[in-house]
Amino acid sequence: METTTQFDLIVKMTLSAWDAQNGYLNKLLDELTEEQLMQEISPGRNRGIYLLGHLVAVSDDMLPLLGFVNRLFPALEQAFLTTPDKAGQEMPAIAELKENLAAVNAKLKEHFTATSSAQWLEKHNSVSAEDFAKEPHRNKLNIIISRTNHMANHIGQMLMLK
Amino acid sequence: METTTQFDLIVKMTLSAWDAQNGYLNKLLDELTEEQLMQEISPGRNRGIYLLGHLVAVSDDMLPLLGFVNRLFPALEQAFLTTPDKAGQEMPAIAELKENLAAVNAKLKEHFTATSSAQWLEKHNSVSAEDFAKEPHRNKLNIIISRTNHMANHIGQMLMLK
């Protein structure tokens, strides 16, 4: 196996892991009722709807972070990133959040497909060129790795709603 | 940047993500009391001690899966992999499980350090040579990716104990 193929293979494995977590999330969302998603994952903790909105907002934020396009749903930031659950903020309905999730994932997929292995190792938009020169691991692919683990963490919590 | 360096960089990023989740787990274990670890993560669900033992057993099982050595604590399989929580099985004390975790991670680290980037793309021990020829992504590094996400999933649940 030549080295370029090895490099491409690992990039593909990393993207497949992201896809797998999104698959688990979508399967779980298909299984949970709206009533279940309005429950807390454990007494006093975040509700399912908040974690759903939080995951949509975090994925949406990857669009500018990876240099693709602006966020599709910037209003989600206030409801699901800067404000904790149950603080009185307005939230979209669950059905709307699910549509947002699908739209964000379709847009991400479109850009992922157009990104070469070498481009995945370019800097993302939250690191300066100066820092990136010293820390080349702070690249776009590392965003995928960290966001995949972030999603796995919250999926583990949302499983409590079943 | 030459291609070999790119390949090495992604391998390093993948191993760093594994280390990061283990760091989160150890930090959480330092913060939780034994009493908290004996609680259920949510009413009727797994207890913290079970998830701890489960994560130790899964990591221990990576030693033979990656072709390094035999499992260090094979008795954990019955208590934490093949038997659900609260089924009457005997379990080691929490302090012992924490020691087991440290021992498993030290052994994994020893072998990780001795594994070259190219070796990470070799087949693991749960796939046949025939299948691996058709599906080269079923390599050792993919075990790290999937086990990192698995750990993140359960850490999300153990955070409920805080």
Image: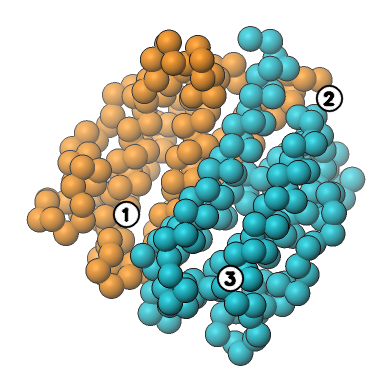
Chain colours: A cyan, B orange
Residue A105 in view in this figure: yes
Q: Are marks 3 and 2 on the same chain?
A: no
From this view, report whether residue A157 is shown above or below residue B140.
below
User: Pointers 1 and 2 in contact (CB under 8 A)?
Assistant: no
- State the residue position of label 3: A95
- Give the letter of the chain under mark 2: B
Task: Say which residue appears at 53% left-offset and 43% top-offset.
Answer: A20
- Count of numbered circles on the image: 3
- State the residue position of label 1: B51
- In the image, what residue type sits under mark 2? Met
Task: Say which residue appears at 43% left-offset and 31% top-offset.
Answer: B108
Which dot, 3 or 1, sits closer to the camera?
Answer: 3
Residue at far right of view: A129
Q: How crowded is mark 1: few (under 14 residues within 10 Å), some or many (20 or more)?
A: many
Task: Say which residue appears at 42% left-offset and 60% top-offset.
Answer: A31
Q: Residues within 10 Å of mark 2 (few under 14, many from 20)?
A: few
Estimate the x, y position of residue B57 in percent, counting from the top left.
30, 41
Q: Which of B72 and B117 is in front in this view?
A: B117
- Give the letter of the chain under mark 3: A
